[in-house]
Amino acid sequence: MSRTLLIGFVCLLAVLTVALFERPEKVEDLEEDIINAQNFYEIPPLPGKDIYGFITEGENVRIEESVVRTNESLYTILRKHNIDPQIIYNIQQEAAGIINLSRMMPGQNYRIYKDEDDAFAMVWHQSKVDYAVINWQDDINVETGSVPVNKEEAEATGVINSSLYETVVDAGVSQRLGVELADVFGWEIDFFALRQGDHFKVIYENLYANGEYLGIGDIIAAEFQHRGRVYKAYYFENDSRRGFFNENGDSMQKELLKAPFRYSQRISSNFSHSRFHPILNQRRPHYGTDYAAPTGTPIISVGEGVVTEAQRRGGNGNIVQIRHNNSYKTAYLHLNGFAPGIRKGVKVEQGQVIGYVGQTGLATGPHLCYRLYVNEKPVNSVTVDMPAADSLEEKYLEEFQHVVNILDNRLNDLELQSEIALK
């Protein structure tokens, strides 16, 4: 019996030797041979690497994680781990043109890699996503990288009781979603004049890196009912176009924003052809919309354009006027002061801060009088219908409509929080 087993073992060994050393004709054959050999000999898998490229499994590698503290620098951190000053100097020289290692800020994460007790590498995170890898084990090497960002779709609904931002938070979502919604619908809806009962439905992305929540990503589709009218927006992207469009393929982006603030401010006086002036005690036209806000509140330009006036002028107080194109002009009155660099002739971008709320000129309290002119005639900025930017070309409409149908079904399936509460 033992002689038979011995002969069988020798034959098996011969077969394995041929299988392992004979070059296979295909890569697939090689992979199968390796798997079979591993299964036979129970060979452990090769050591794995972490996301920064370091082999940590099966090696004598220790990782020490920490955060940058006040007054700490690359030098002080590495000296704590007994790195020679000359090596630290060489690292800084090698990093020149790749990353500025002098910009370490308190609270930023970093990790030190050690072989036994000797540190040989460091990973410094400038943010939750971006990082730098510094390796001095053999030659000094400095590289930058980014942690892969994962996107997960989420949904939210809300009924306005006070402000959009409070409603979003009450729905258990980051307030940032309110900012994103205001950006999408900012051309159509005056978010400073929302009413109780207005409501929204939204499909959006949450962003994660390394399993850690980063924040709100892009909005995919949204529906907002304001004063009985329903507004819808869908994100569409292909090789030629991308952006938010309504159900007809018209761009959600208009020439100008509805209001010159990033956050909600109360309208204290509306556009009127005959308003009783509280200081002059007489009726006269009020060709603007007054927004009551604390002194110093930033005011933004509702569109890109060129500053045609930035000065103090009589009862208007400190005033900024901006020409946006041949048709549209805006004015911002009673400012407490101008933003840095704002002067006549300067080009400004949409959303750029141009000044701050005040009560200069004829004003009873801190507020902004915002005026919109179309072809040099004052119009009511709250009610005027702004023209859309370029709509989708006809050749993209079939593809777009397919996207709309899918997203509409998902939006229709969402139930408002108030509807859920009634069940």
Image (tube, rainbow, N blue to C red):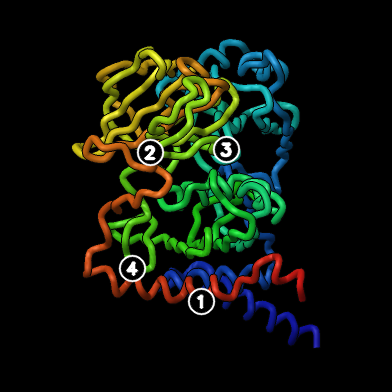
Q: Counting residues from the N terminus, which is met first, the one under dot 2 or under dot 1?
A: 2
* 86 to the left or right of 143: right
For badge 4, the amino acid type reads Asn
Secondary-structure class at tag 1: helix
Q: Which residue is mark 1?
A: 409
Where is residue 141? Give x, y as percent: 49, 29
The mark nearer the N terminus, 1 or 3, is 3
Marks 2 and 4, how far apart in space?
A: 35 Å
Q: CA distance from mark 2 to mark 1?
A: 45 Å
Q: Which residue is mark 3?
A: 266
Point out the frontmost of discs 2 and 4.
Answer: 2
Q: CA distance from mark 3 to mark 4?
A: 32 Å
Tell me the mark number nearer the camera, choosing from 3 and 4: 3
Q: Disc 2 or disc 3, which is closer to the eye? A: 2
Mark linked to residue 191 = none
Q: Looking at the image, is 90 positioned above or below residue 284?
A: above
Can you say which quadrant of the picture contains the C terminus? bottom right
Q: Which residue is mark 4?
A: 248
Residue wearing tag 2: 273
